[in-house]
């Protein structure tokens, strides 16, 4: 979807500013480490927040859609700055019982902007929290040409910490330690922001680098989905599982990560292991699935797990012929079963 990079004036005289986007990448080299600030990468819904100083607030998604009505608990933010007008950048999060952002939880809150009663009911069950990390317009002045350090100072001066919103800390330098900390605490990753970077509305900029933590685990292949088009006759995805409470539990479909040769090799192995019996318990609702005896062990990479143990954004790393099926991976964590 194309993102608007122009800036228009709204009826409340605040500029409509599409959010600046980060480019996937790796940590800056050690020599450049001190020229970057590091912020936790959040797993939520990006939002630009408009505070016209008249007791109202408007939240817009990356697409520009007004999503204010979906998050009634954020309405008190409207008066947090009094009559000071501001445009802020942030992310709406739903937190799990461990205090970590869960996109799966947040999905139950999204799409309710035009259903205020449903939004209010969901808010009572799955409250959200808004984290703020930038300010692009303040008190009638555009800050988009102000370097990150100046915008960050202006944001901190606003002291925006309330019942459903906060301004998390950023650190300068020490990127490797920051990345390790996000991995240790099970967070999605890190955003590296150049200290001298201006705010580029709607641009996927190399001045901001996002690093997503990925984990890898062994899985058992229990089925596959036929490919289409140029992949006809080959697996388009494999269906994988892990042990949980003595049974093979389905944890997701993996459709990326193979070379052409690896996909062909896998196709032959899958045909040799064909069975009419689904090995997963319970059987997943996957239309068109072909089942195999779960004796192939593979290693997959993924970002996080959903609350019910499913792998998010999995990709194939390699077959593990060195492992017998009974040796493959640890069980799914008990709290996810």
Image (cartoon, rainbow, N blue to C red):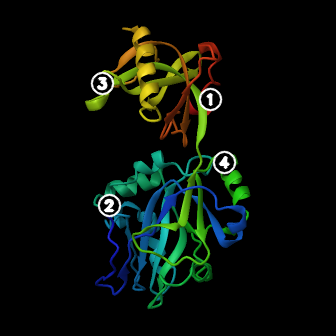
Q: Nearer the viewer, mark 3 or mark 2?
A: 3
Mark-to-mark CA distance, 2 and 1: 35 Å
Residue 114 lies in what quarter of the image? bottom left
Nearer the N terminus, badge 4 or badge 1?
A: 4
Q: Is residue 282 visible?
A: no
Q: Is residue 79 above or below residue 313?
A: below
Q: Residue at x 52, y 38 (%)?
A: 307
Q: Give the number of the disc on residue 113.
A: 2
Label count reads: 4
Q: Nearer the viewer, mark 4 or mark 2?
A: 4
- Disc 4: which residue: 183
x and y percentages locating residue 9 in the rendered image:
31, 84
Mark 1, Cα crowd under 10 Å, few <14 / some 14-19 / many 20+, is: few
Nearer the N terminus, badge 2 or badge 1?
A: 2
Mark-to-mark CA distance, 3 and 4: 35 Å
Residue 286 lies in what quarter of the image? top left
Q: Is residue 257 above or below residue 275?
A: below
Q: Give the number of the disc on residue 287.
A: 3
- Disc 1: which residue: 334
Mark 2, Cα crowd under 10 Å, few <14 / some 14-19 / many 20+, is: some
Q: Secondary structure at mark 3?
A: loop
Q: Residue at x 37, y 54 (%)?
A: 110
Nearer the N terminus, badge 1 or badge 3?
A: 3
Q: Secondary structure at mark 4?
A: helix
Task: Tell which of 48 and 21 is nearer to you.
Answer: 21
Mark-to-mark CA distance, 3 and 2: 32 Å
Q: Give the number of the disc on residue 152.
A: none
Q: Quadrant of the N terminus?
A: bottom left
Image side of residue 259 versus residue 70, left or right: right
């Amino acid at each position: 979807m194309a993102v608007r990079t122009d800036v228009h004036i709204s009826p409340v005289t605040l500029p409509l500013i599409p959010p600046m986007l980060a480019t996937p990448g790796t940590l800056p080299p050690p020599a450049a480490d001190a020229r970057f600030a590091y912020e936790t990468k959040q797993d939520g819904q990006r939002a630009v927040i408009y505070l016209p100083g008249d007791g109202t607030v408007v939240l817009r998604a990356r697409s520009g859609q007004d999503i204010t009505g979906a998050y009634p608990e954020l309405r008190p933010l409207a008066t947090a700055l009094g009559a000071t007008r501001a445009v802020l950048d942030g992310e709406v999060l739903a937190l799990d019982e461990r205090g970590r952002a869960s996109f799966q939880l947040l999905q139950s809150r999204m799409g309710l902007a035009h259903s205020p009663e449903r939004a209010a009911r969901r808010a009572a069950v799955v409250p959200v929290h808004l984290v703020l990390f930038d300010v692009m317009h303040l008190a009638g002045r555009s800050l988009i040409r102000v370097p990150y350090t100046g915008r960050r100072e202006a944001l901190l001066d606003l002291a925006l910490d309330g019942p459903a919103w906060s301004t998390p800390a950023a650190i300068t330098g020490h990127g490797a330690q920051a990345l390790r900390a996000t991995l240790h605490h099970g967070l999605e990753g890190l955003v590296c922001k150049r200290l001298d970077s201006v705010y580029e509305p709607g641009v996927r900029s190399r001045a901001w680098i996002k690093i997503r933590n990925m984990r890898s685990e062994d899985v058992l292949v229990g089925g596959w989905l036929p490919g289409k088009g140029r992949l006809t006759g080959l697996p388009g995805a494999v269906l994988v599982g892990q042990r949980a409470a003595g049974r093979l539990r389905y944890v997701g479909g993996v459709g990326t990560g193979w070379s052409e040769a690896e996909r062909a090799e896998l196709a032959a192995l899958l045909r040799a292991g064909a069975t009419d019996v689904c090995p997963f318990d319970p059987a997943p609702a996957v239309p068109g699935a072909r089942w195999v005896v779960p004796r192939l062990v593979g290693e997959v990479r993924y970002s996080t797990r959903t609350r019910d143990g499913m792998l998010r954004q999995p990709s194939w790393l390699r077959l593990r012929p060195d492992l017998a099926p009974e040796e493959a991976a640890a069980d799914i964590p008990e709290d996810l079963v």
